[in-house]
Image (spheres, helix red, strand yellow):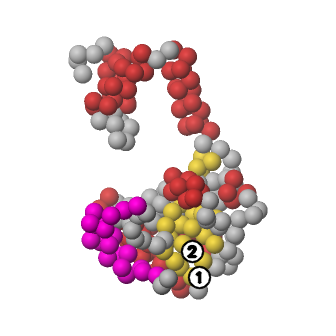
Amino acid sequence: MTHYPKPMSRLIKELAKLPGIGPKTAQRLAFHLFAMPRDEVVGLATAMVEAKESLKYCDVCGHLTDESPCQVCQDSTRDRHLLCVVEEPKDVIALEKTREFKGVYHVLHGALSPLEGIGPEELTIAQLMQRLQTREINEVILACDPDMEGEATALYLAKIIKPLGIKVTRLARGLPIGGDLEYIDEVTLGKAIEGRQEL
């Protein structure tokens, strides 16, 4: 990055550390930021620092919040007998956008991945098991990602939760709305056939 002045090189280097941002995109973003009015750049920087300093994880469920417990955990209309386990806070947001789920959440902050050194101790599994000891929860929905790590996490959790006498379910898997069968991968198509429902 010797072609750039030092401040621009540093900005490109820092932007390239963000997920999904390669060197070319970092360069474009850096030049865009430079072209923006100063007050907009200051506003962006202030928002980033404010978010970093004021956001934390909910003491109850582990969701991202600026107050603990979070809004979901404070909501007295939620079904406290139904607990949905997700990998990341962004998964809570995705489920909340559907307006279909009326229970409460537990965020694991990752998935089991022995190759990356992520075992049960690195996730909030111990906190989950403590919540389940209260006997308030009747059903746990495992909403892990449909990848190898998510599958391993779901199987592990099912194995340790079922002995507690709590119903364990999994999100349905299958065909996307508007999808064409010829473009669906074999695993997804197989799961759709396996999980077929009577009409």
| Main secondary-structure element of the magenta-colored stretch | helix
Q: Mark 2: few, some, or many residues within 10 Å (few <14, many ≥20)?
A: many
Identity of the residue drawn at 60% across and 46% down: 56
* 76 relative to 180 in the view: left or right: right
Q: Is residue 14 positioned above or below 148 on the image?
A: above
Residue 126, horizontal then vertical, whole percent: 54, 68
Q: Position of residue 100 (x, y in %)?
A: 61, 64
Q: Which mark is residue 177?
A: none
Q: Are marks 1 and 2 in contact (CB under 8 Å)?
A: yes
Q: For this view, does 132 lie left or right of residue 144?
A: right
Q: CA distance from mark 1 to mark 2?
A: 7 Å
Residue stretch rendered in magenta on the structure: 178-197
Q: Quadrant of residue 79?
A: bottom right
Q: Outermost residue, right direction?
A: 76
- The crowd level at tag 1 (other Cα within 10 Å; few <14, some 14-19, many 20+) is some
Residue 10 in the magenta stretch? The answer is no
Residue at 44 percent of width and 58 percent of height: 110
- Of the 4 image quadrants, the one containing the N terminus is top left
Which amino acid type is marked by label 1?
A: Ile
Amino acid of disc 2 = Val
In this view, the residue in front, 118 or 88, is 88
Q: Secondary structure at mark 2?
A: strand
Residue holding disc 2: 140
186 relative to 169 in the view: left or right: left
